[in-house]
Image (spheres, rainbow, N blue to C red):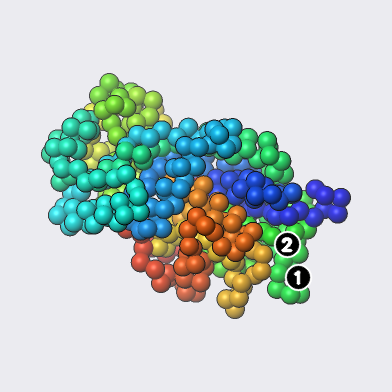
């Protein structure tokens, strides 16, 4: 810290959103940026994710966030000197009903208009491209060759390396306790378990714990956490990366991608209650395995070598939160920005982090117009006035707060 203990910005939460945001703030020229993390960097959702990176979103916001983030992943070596292990694997969104076909084709038109390399594939075209999938099991789907995946622990290592290299002050094992406000409605300092840090600029992140972080800052954040599960099968030659692309069975909330010669698949139970994931729901995992075996027959009976459950962040409309913190009266707390990737931190995280940094510095961002994505879109019960992004896991529709 400076002799007087003042820093130019404090970012709360050392996940992918906070980590990259702190780095963007430093790169933008702030001399002193402190990243305050309760445990260790990546200890939240960011190290536990499946790494799916998709620009095939259901709204123009989602598409733009995905495209910007993929461009960032592709240019990381040059920019950062470290990378998140991005692999452009190609991603199919298969349709299983006529209404999904209609929606999918309309989405492709919207995505193409925004510059995404995406096309609608017929059943035969999709079958030829994805030989590991059961033939003629779907009605065709949208396909983006540039969508892919990152390696989430490698992404944590990348933002840690970037922050260390460029001089972000990493304060791990340091818990954010609250804000010390100025008389004029701004912020004077951040209270932590290591004492106060004087600053007039704060970015609040926290993934599944963002609502609690917000509460400590005196702002109500409609964000929650819920159990999400991921499993990885043992290897099988029928699942070699050339035979498997990424795919999302949207209605069932199941997605998959190649991993170490086997298949990684993730799932969210539509009936899951909000809350912290404490254990694996084996019954639900079995149900998902049956569905997966219908779609990717090589997985039938394959052993699992890894299974984990972790708490995923979500927002009620599946969209990110980017905007000023608001006090109880709905007035902006000057100098305090809130950032959530709404459960899409691998695919949108870098863009969300950059926009949060831009908002903290300028109040606006050239990446995306986020004026509709702030906290003021939610009512006191956390209901959003925006239509939800239709391309999302079946997250709970309400938060646990
Ligand atoms: C199993 C699983 C699979 C997923 N798969 C994908 C995927 O394939 N693709 C995708 O796009 N997204 C995926 N996600 C979602 C993605 O991981 C998250 O959206 C993203 O990691 C959120 O990043 P974050 O920085 O906002 O939060 P986090 O990574 O959770 O980081 C928040 C940090 O804040 C810290 N913190 C909390 N409270 C305090 C406090 N009071 N003081 C200081 N620090 C505090 C926490 O310790 C934590 O380290 C997945 C999530 C899970 C759980």
Q: With respect to residue 143, does 234 lie above or below? A: above
In the rendered structure, the answer to whether residue 214 lies left or right of residue 8 reads: left
Viewer-nearest residue: 228 or 181? 181
Q: Please state the horizontal and vertical placement of residue 117, each as a whole percent of the image.
A: 32, 44
Identify the residue at horizontal 35%, vertical 50% (top origin).
115
Residue beneath disc 2:
200
Q: Please state the horizontal and vertical placement of residue 71, each as a whole percent of the image.
A: 46, 42
Identify the residue at horizontal 53%, vertical 36% (top origin).
76
In the rendered structure, the answer to whether residue 1 lies left or right of residue 207 reads: right
Identify the residue at horizontal 70%, vertical 55% (top origin).
9
Tag 1 and tag 2, C-beta contact below 8 Å: yes
Does the closest atom of ligand 1 sit within 8 Å of the Cβ of label 2?
no
Q: Classify mark 2: helix, strand or loop.
A: loop
Identify the residue at horizontal 54%, vertical 33% (top origin).
77
Q: Please state the horizontal and vertical placement of residue 356, each as a whole percent of the image.
A: 57, 56
Kindly identify which numbered label has been placed on residue 182: 1
Circle 2 Cα neighbour tier, 10 Å, few/some/many (<14 / 14–19 / ≥20): many
Alpha-carbon span between mark 1 and mark 2: 9 Å
Q: Classify mark 1: helix, strand or loop.
A: loop
């Amino acid at each position: 810290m400076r002799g007087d203990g003042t820093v130019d910005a404090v970012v709360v939460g050392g996940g992918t959103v906070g980590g990259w945001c702190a780095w963007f703030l430093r790169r933008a020229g702030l001399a002193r940026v402190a990243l305050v993390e309760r445990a260790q960097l990546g200890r939240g959702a960011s190290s536990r994710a499946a790494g799916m990176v998709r620009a095939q979103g259901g709204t123009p916001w989602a598409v733009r966030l995905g495209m910007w983030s993929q461009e960032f992943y592709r240019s990381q070596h040059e920019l950062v000197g470290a990378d998140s292990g991005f692999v452009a694997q190609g991603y199919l969104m298969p349709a299983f009903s006529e209404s999904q076909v209609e929606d999918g084709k309309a989405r492709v038109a919207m995505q193409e208009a925004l510059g995404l390399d995406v096309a609608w594939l017929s059943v035969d075209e999709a079958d030829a491209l994805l030989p590991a999938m059961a033939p003629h099991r779907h009605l065709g789907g949208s396909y983006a060759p540039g969508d892919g995946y990152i390696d989430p622990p490698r992404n944590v290592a990348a933002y840690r390396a970037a922050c260390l290299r460029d001089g972000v002050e990493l304060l791990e094992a340091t818990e954010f306790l609250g804000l010390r406000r100025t008389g004029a409605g701004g912020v004077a300092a951040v209270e932590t378990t290591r004492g106060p840090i004087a600053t007039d600029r704060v970015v609040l992140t926290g993934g599944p714990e963002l609502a609690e972080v917000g509460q400590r800052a005196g702002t109500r954040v409609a964000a929650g956490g819920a159990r999400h599960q991921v499993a990885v099968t043992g290897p099988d030659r029928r699942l070699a990366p050339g035979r498997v692309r990424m795919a999302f069975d949207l209605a069932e909330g199941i997605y998959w991608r190649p991993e170490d010669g086997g298949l990684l698949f993730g799932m969210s139970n539509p009936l899951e209650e909000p809350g912290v994931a404490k254990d694996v729901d084996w019954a639900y995992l079995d149900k998902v395995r049956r569905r997966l075996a219908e779609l990717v027959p090589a997985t039938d009976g394959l052993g699992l070598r890894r299974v984990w459950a972790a708490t995923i962040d979500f927002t009620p409309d599946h969209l990110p939160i980017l905007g000023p913190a608001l006090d109880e009266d709905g007035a902006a707390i000057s100098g305090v920005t809130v950032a959530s990737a709404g459960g899409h931190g691998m695919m949108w995280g870098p863009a969300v982090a950059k926009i949060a940094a831009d908002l903290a510095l300028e109040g606006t961002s050239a990446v995306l117009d986020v004026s509709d994505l702030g906290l003021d879109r939610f009512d006191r019960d956390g209901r959003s006035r925006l239509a939800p992004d239709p391309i999302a896991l079946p997250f709970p529709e309400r938060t646990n707060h």
